[in-house]
Image: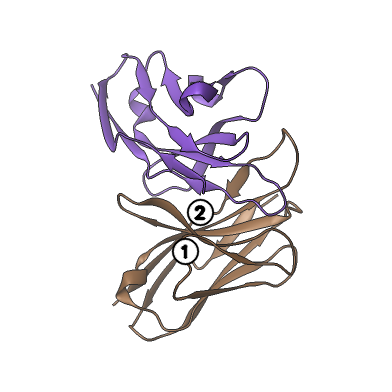
Chain colours: A brown, B purple
Amino acid sequence: NAGVTQTPKFQVLKTGQSMTLQCAQDMNHNSMYWYRQDPGMGLRLIYYSASEGTTDKGEVPNGYNVSRLNKREFSLRLESAAPSQTSVYFCASTKIGVGNTEAFFGQGTRLTVV
Amino acid sequence: AQSVTQPDIHITVSEGASLELRCNYSYGATPYLFWYVQSPGQGLQLLLKYFSGDTLVQGIKGFEAEFKRSQSSFNLRKPSVHWSDAAEYFCAVGRMNRDDKIIFGKGTRLHILP
């Protein structure tokens, strides 16, 4: 049982390049999330998807797009990377269950934009 | 709008001393509350969670937290810290309804003195 898998683990981009961060979960969870983590800022929600086919903006969506490809996969795309998007990105998933819910996290993607 | 405040950015305690990390939340309904821990370079691990019932919840690694509705707080405690507890701790709030999302605080970094 792999849990939440993110790829890649590390990436360096030049300003203006595009890339997609991949996330997959094998726990049959309904909800998936993308966060970015910056020093002193905690985890800030970029986008989330409550179910297959739906996506919603979080706290910091500008400069990002997402796709909920199916129940397992939730990708994050940077169309034109900027240095301000240098961060560690975490994907998470949760199942919906009263009294029995938690978020499971991937190991993170460290992205540097130069 | 839901929000989480962790007033202490850094806390330093001596090994063997007691610990309390503060968390205050703002949420329009009865919240689900979580504490996560992140060791350097690692992902996030769930320490404990509160959904309903007993307001004192026990977690892993000897941690506990108390939900106080009147104070909108969910403080994390440990009677005696170990050097391995040095990490960053995040409080989070959500409800895990179909369209809900999880919001994190900015984190508290715990330093342990030998």
Residue A98 in the image: state x and y as whole percent: 75, 37
Residue B78, quarter of picture: top left
Ranked by sequence position, the earlier of labels 1 and 2 is 1
Q: Is residue B46 left or right of residue B18?
A: right
Q: Which mark is residue B38?
A: none
Q: Are marks 1 and 2 on the same chain?
A: yes
- Give the camera-side residue of B98 and A85: B98
Q: Is B46 drawn above or below residue A111 in the view shown?
A: above
Tell me the crowding category of disc 2: few under 14, some 14 to 19, or many 20 or more residues within 10 angstroms, Cα based.
many
Amino acid carrying mark 1 in the image: Lys
Image quadrant where residue B59 sits: top right
- Quarter of the figure with residue B57: top right
Going 44% across and 76% down the picture, which residue do you hit? A63
Decide: few, some or many residues near mark 1? Use Cα within 10 Å; few <14, some 14-19, many ≥20. Answer: some
Secondary structure found at label 2: loop
The residue type indicated by label 2 comes to: Gln
Marks 1 and 2 in Cβ contact (< 8 Å): yes
Residue at left offset 60%, top offset 51%? B101
Identify which residue is drawn at 37% across, 70% down.
Answer: A85
Element on which disc 1 rests: loop
Q: Residue furthest bottom?
A: A16
Q: Nearer the viewer, residue B21 or B80?
A: B21
Chain under callout 1: A
The answer to whether residue A12 is above or below residue B32 is below
From mark 1 to mark 2, how far is it between C-alphas?
8 Å
Which residue does the image show at 44% across and 25% down from the upper left?
B75
Viewport quadrant of the C terminus of chain B: top left
Looking at the rendered structure, which numbered label has been put on residue A107?
2
Report the residue marked by disc 1.
Answer: A9
